[in-house]
Image (cartoon, helix red, strand yellow):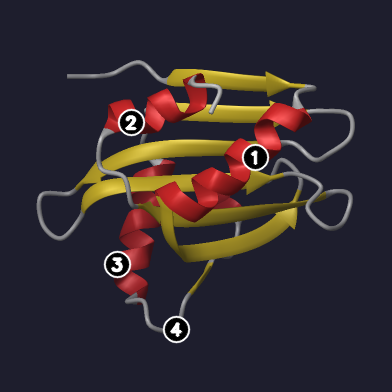
Amino acid sequence: MIHPTQTHVFRNAESLFKPKHDTFLDVYLGECLLGGDALNRTNLNEVTMIHKEDQDPSFCTRILNGIINSQPLIKVLSKSIESSEIIFDVFYLNNYEDIEDFYCLKTAFDFMVEGVMLYQIFEVEVKRLSMLNDFWITNE
């Protein structure tokens, strides 16, 4: 069954988004598996991604390829005048071998330096799609 992407947009709503961003990182996401930076608007498949030393490189490559070749189930976009654009994309990946889990791609534009973006891929700790989606809907 194909699920449409649930999209949550925070436009010029930094005061609402910032606490949600921090809580999502602290509570809902696990460790960062991969990270890389490039010029803004560079496609993910063109970015050199670095994995943590304790991660299996071939496993990380399969996660990256799964994300590149999938559509997110949840997309969260924050765009404001005061801060950089941030996107969270949540994916469910299953290769029927060693990958069956939720993963999140965080993209931050103009990260630290104007014109440079940061990609990070995280394991998702919360395993229910409805909880992940509801988090972005509620005002808590």
Q: Nearer the viewer, residue 39 or 34?
A: 34
Cβ atoms under marks 1 and 4 closer than 8 Å: no
Residue 89 to residue 136: above or below? below
Q: CA distance from mark 2 to mark 1?
A: 17 Å
| Residue 72 seen by the camera | no
Seen as rendered, the residue at the extreme bottom is 53
Label 3 sits on what residue type?
Answer: Phe
Query: Which residue does the numbered mark 1 point to in the structure image?
Result: 19
Query: Label 3: which residue?
Result: 59
Q: Earlier in the sequence, mark 4 or mark 2?
A: 4
Q: Label 1, label 4: how many angstroms apart (C-alpha)?
A: 30 Å
- Kindly identify the amino acid type of the residue bearing the numbered disc 1: Pro
Residue drawn 75% across and 44% down? 109
Secondary element under disc 3, as helix, strand or loop, is helix
Which kind of residue does numbered mark 4 sit on?
Glu
Q: Which residue has dot 4 on it?
A: 53
Residue 6 position by quadrant: top left
